[in-house]
Amino acid sequence: MPKLTTVSEETYVIAQPIEGISLNGYEYLLDDQDEIMVFNSYDNAHYFVTECIADENQEDFIRATVDCLDLI
């Protein structure tokens, strides 16, 4: 799994539980270089999710990077 070099309280990622089971950890949205996509604000992450993810609970995909211990 890719690791983030900088984790800040002000950055966000798009993630979902692996196979829908929260005990399995998260899988993260990757960019074209297979790096985890990091958004500089909640608003930027929210915009991406609402434009690109067709799910009724879109906000559930947004995670603060500091809350994703497996990224550190």
Image (cartoon, helix red, strand yellow):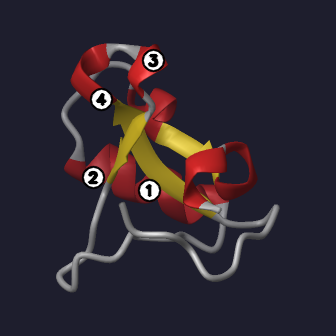
- Sequence-first disc among 4 and 2: 4
Q: CA distance from mark 1 to mark 2?
A: 6 Å
- Sequence-first disc among 3 and 2: 3
Q: CA distance from mark 4 to mark 2?
A: 22 Å
Number of numbered callouts drawn? 4
Pointer 4 residue: 18
Pointer 3 residue: 22
Q: CA distance from mark 4 to mark 3?
A: 7 Å
- Residue 60 position within the rendered picture, expressed as x and y whole percent measured from the top left: 49, 28
Pointer 2 residue: 51
* Amino acid bearing label 3: Ser
Q: Residue at x 49, y 32 (%)?
A: 59
Depth order, front residue of 39/30 = 30
* Amino acid bearing label 1: Tyr
Q: Are marks 4 and 2 in contact (CB under 8 Å)?
A: no
Q: Are marks 1 and 3 in contact (CB under 8 Å)?
A: no
- Sequence-first disc among 1 and 4: 4
- Sequence-first disc among 1 and 3: 3
Depth order, front residue of 24/31 = 24
Pointer 1 residue: 47
Q: CA distance from mark 1 to mark 3?
A: 24 Å
